[in-house]
Amino acid sequence: MTPKHVENGERATPRWTREQAARIERTDGTVAPIIYPPREAMAPDVHGWDTWILRERDGSIATVDGWRVIFSLTAPAHLLPGKRHDVAEIRYFYSKDGERWHDGGPVFETDARGSRQWAGSALLDDDGRLYVFYTASGRAGEEELTYEQRLAVGSGGTIVADDAGLDIEGPFEHEILLEPDGDRYEREEQYRGMIYTFRDPWFFEDPADGETYLLFEANTPVPEDEGVCEDPVWEEFNGSVGIARSPTGDPTDWRLEDPLLEGVCVNQELERPHVVVRNGSYYLFISSHDHTFAPGLDGPDGLYGFVADSLTGEYRPLNDSGLVLTNPENAPYQAYSWMVLPHRDELLVSGFFNYYDLGGLTLDDVAGLSPDEQLAKFGGTLAPTVRVAIEGDRTRITGTLSHGHIPLESEELPDLPDERLGHRDE
Ligand code: FRU
């Protein structure tokens, strides 16, 4: 049946279909090497996970007085891994060489929106103004934790740098930018499954016409009893990649548009969506979990990608299924929440080091272990960066750089065979 809006000549939202997702399998080209523990934590007594780098409007990595800056969700290292989302705080780290990151401390004072902050992106605008986009989760000051998610920004902070280091100084002005409309994007009260999503704002400028967008993770409302999925149980697996456009280019002024991609009947969480443009092709990447695939589909925690000829084009999955990068079978949760950056003619994929080799335990088994045992299995720092070759709609992992290494396009990549293991000097 042709959907109404297609009959009317409107664009049909591209879909990640069950047929495509049924082709997901680990292959030599999609499995990252096993990673070894890093030598040091991101900061003493701190665990970090989702991470993004300060970029300019055109997506290139920003430098300030020779420093590059990353932002990470962080929590005290004594907390159990599952607890960290309840207290997440954004800290920044800065580096001259893109390998050794110095802890700058929390970005915001206590006035950020939400009872905690989840992932986002960061823009250093042409006029030097800093915008830190984030997900405001819950409400500030709430007594009981809630899971409301709103897209927010803190702007107006100043970056002060010299040869010795870099400081981000407030005050920031905080603003809620977007909430789901209940029509294109599902609201919390509409959701029928585990936990809805409306999060992870990612700033994007389309090089084709200079238009300004915000991408985000969301869910598509699925009406009950209309047989949208063959099996009604699949209907709560309704992830989408949302998008909003700024009519003026102002990074605080957004209008919701139709999603870029939907995974209805397929997967509930299309996380941290972002686009990389190469040779006129638009590569859309998301992270997703094994447990968020609908019943009957079997995909691992992984980085999934799609390609189209324009930002709102007809996305089709990379490597036929979407799978670009996953963890080895014996350490299926070793890394997650990836960010893809172009580097000359290849892609670099940075993620965080999640769980060590669990020796066959499931994450539920791990949650049943003693606190010390659970903590011993959690990485909570940056993973080795993975190098990925790309051609058309095919990708292939070719090696790794060291933990947390984020090179600039102007920097040569090290050419060491043992880099594949994430080690440089062992
Ligand atoms: C992915 C993620 C993000 C979210 C964050 C919360 O790792 O689920 O979507 O912003 O973790 O900790």
Image (cartoon, helix red, strand yellow):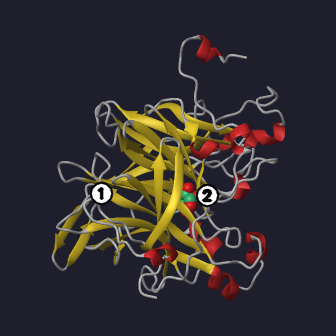
Residue at x-position 25% and y-position 55%: 156
**Which quadrant holds residue 334?**
bottom right
Residue 106 position, x and y percent, is: 38, 71
**In the foreground, 32 or 53:** 32
N-terminal label among 1 and 2: 1
Image: 124 above or below 219: below
Residue type, label 1: Ile
Q: In the drawing, does residue 95 fall left or right of residue 244?
A: left
Q: CA distance from mark 1 to mark 2?
A: 24 Å
x and y percentages locating residue 28 in the rendered image: 62, 61
Percent of width and height locating residue 307: 51, 39
Toward the viewer: 142 or 267? Answer: 267
Residue 67 in the image, given as x and y percentages of width and height: 24, 69
The furthest residue to the top: 8
Quick one: 110 or 415, which is closer to the camera?
Answer: 415
Q: Residues within 10 Å of mark 1 (few under 14, many from 20)?
A: many
How packed is label 2: few (under 14 Cα within 10 Å), some, or many (20 or more)? many
Horizontal side of residue 180 vs 39, given as left or right: right
Q: Inspect the image, locate mark 2, and give the three-letter code of the amino acid beneath it.
A: Gly
Q: Left or right? Give the position of 284 relative to 24.
A: left
As drawn, the label of residue 302 is 2
Residue 138 visible within the image:
no
Residue highlighted by disc 1: 61
Q: Residue at x 57, y 11 (%)?
A: 8
Regarding residue 204, the answer to whether it shows in the image is yes
SS at circle 1: loop
What's the residue at 71%, 78% (across, down)? 358
| Quadrant in which the N terminus appears | top right
